[in-house]
Amino acid sequence: MNEAKLRYYSRFKEVTEFQLHTLRNQLAQSVPSGQLCTARIDLEKMAAKYRSLLDSLTTAKSPQPQTITHVDSKELEALQETLALEKEKRMVLEAMQTIEGVSAGAVTQIQLLSKRMATLELKELNERERANHAARQWEIAKEQLRNEEQRSSELERKVSQLSKACLEMQELETEARHQFLNSVSREESEADKKRVRELEGSEMALRHEVEKLKDIALIADRQRQAIEQEQKNNQLEVQSLRDRVLELESNKGPDESSFGRLNRQLTQLQLADAEAVKRASEHHNSINRLETSNIKLERRITDKDNQLNALREEHKSKENRLRKTVHQLRLRYAGCVAVSESEKMSRLLREAQADRERMFESLQTAEAARSKAEGLAAREVSFQTTAAELAALLKDEENPDRIAIVVQKLQQLQTRLADTKMSEAMHRRAAERLQKTAHYLESVSRSQEVQITALDNERLRLEKELEEAQLIWEQREAQLEDALHAALKNEVAVAQQLEINALRRRVVDLVDYAKVEHVVDSSADAVKVLEERLANKEQVLAKTKQLLEEACRETELMKQRHAEQIRHLNEQMLGTADRSMKQLLAAVTNEPDEESQAKRKIYQMEKSLRNLEEALNEQQQMLSVQAAKLRLTEDENSRTKQSLEDAKTKSDKEISRLIHSHETSFYDGNFREDKKILGQEIRNQMEKVALLQDELQSTQNELENWKYKAAKAPSIANKKLTDRLKNEVAAKERQNQALTKALEELRGELMKQVSLLGRTNWR
């Protein structure tokens, strides 16, 4: 018996060592949850930095070629002006050489004409200097405008940096809150450490006691073997003595021999009876030992089952956490492009931007060269024609009216100069008017930038509120999980109590069937405990229903608030679009000479209005889709409530049926007469209790699933709301960018018009 126990213990020790080895290997291959969270956070930060770097590379522009081309264009203009002056001087010298061959009579008139031409040239030079001064002033204003644009871009970059810093601070705050939620107080940790030390000390003491008891058991076993050997020796001696007595009796008479045989038979019967009694006692003791060992094994099995249940729950919780993280990562990176594809797209986009800039610069230079060449050609043609006419008149001696014709030509030149002055004045006034419109458009753009910053601040505030609401929901989820864990612990305690009661009933059935009443009382107590547990569960269900109702109310409030915010933002956007349209129409209608350009601008503005209307329609469609999704979530909540009520009614019916069956079995008066029938009924009742426990477990699992879904739904709704708000903000930013592009195109057209006016003045 002891050897069998030792072999059993050795096998159990080997199995436990193998299990410990496997668990250690699993722990060595696993990673702590804290390191996993930190690694995930670092990966998200690196991905965000990499995306920002790609964006900065795509949006970066090299200002060096623009500055070089600007300087080259200025030098080329200066050289062209000097070349034009030299050509004019050459033409005048050639005209003077032709005039030297004229007769002396017309010298005085020629001198007067030369004086008039000199005065006209001086006036023309003054006008040119004025035009150059106006062009320089225009360049200075353009440079100031460019500086203002650079400053605004720098301010935008600083604002984006500040917003990124705010987002990083918010991420740090959320991380700290998560760490504080998962952390434990110092007092609790110290108490746990103290308890662990005490348990380790008690474990060592118990091990020493077990070793001492093993030594005592070995000594007792050896003593028992020695006593059994002595008993065997005594029996052999008694048998030898009996044989000698039989031999002595055989030597006597027949009466004495018969009497001896009877005496011998009696002694043999007594010995057989004693041996049978001894064997019965030994069998009874062995049965008791087997029962005790069976009870111990059942207890060990229950302990192992509890450990397996705990490990199963732990693995389930880990699996749920991993599923949550996977779901969050899928939601976060849904629709994202791969890194290689994004790199290819960014590289192609940079190359396309560089090609576009080169083509635009080459086109600008070609247009400038063409316009200057056309102006120089027209000027040369006009100078040559006038010089040829004057030379022909001066050489024609036969014509008596040549001096009058020359005077007429000079008058025509004066009228041309007056016309040029008038056109220059008109162009100057147009340039001033365009400058005013440009300043006005700059003020409008500044006001729109202020509105954009206000909208960005509003967006940040909304994101912060959404994050706070999400944190509140996570705290509620943690509270509900704690409540569920407490309910599961209560269920484990109830299951252990039921198993203990079942074992007690079995022991009582094996030992004595007269103690059935005690078993029935224990089953009644177990039923009462189950009723109390079910009452507690009903309270927990009521609390969860209350939390679900509060969540529904909060989601409705958030939905209303979000609808009001969207309506307010749409009104602001429409108001800004109407104001910008009116301002642009007013700015365009102030120029009656450019009707075709005004029509084109009005067509562009109508096109932008149509685009805005399409964007509004898309937003309305998105709102309708979100409302349909919200109705679906409300239907799911109603279905979960109905299923909870059905499970509650089913459990109530099962409890009433169980109580009724127990009462009928307890108050039956014939259970003492037929013990076997009563034992069978008790076993049936135990099977029913087990079935009831299984049904309760299934209902509890369903409740956990519904609670998990109900607790998870608000966070999903919040995430959807955040995504929707982000999409709306992105759409508004795109609209603002489209408006800024339209303003930049208007500025470019105005600049082109001013440059054309400057060229006509220079001509």
Image: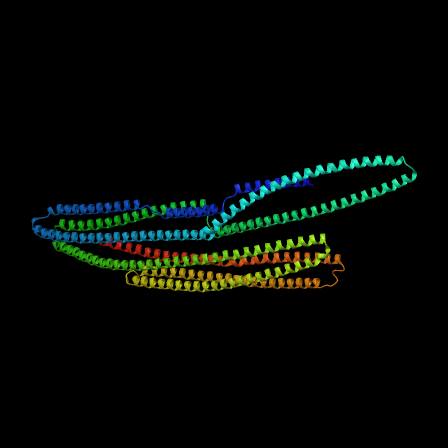
Residue at x 16%, y 46% (from the top left corner): 89
Where does residue 15 sit, x and y in percent of width and height? 62, 41
Work out whether residue 669 or residue 752 is closer to the camera in this orientation and state it: 669
Q: Is residue 180 above or below residue 598?
A: above
Q: Is residue 632 visible?
A: no
**Residue occupying the point 61% across, 48% down:** 303
Front-most of residues 461 and 187: 187
Quarter-of-image position of residue 219: top right
Query: Which of the 4 image quarters holds residue 419?
Result: bottom left
136 sits to left or right of 608? left
Q: In the shown orientation, is residue 588 left or right of residue 684?
A: left
Residue 471 visible within the image = yes
- Percent coordinates x, y for residue 253 in the rendering: 92, 37
User: Which residue is nearer to you in this view: 688 or 713?
Assistant: 688
Quarter of image, res 747: bottom left
- Residue situated in front as seen by the camera: 758 or 403: 758
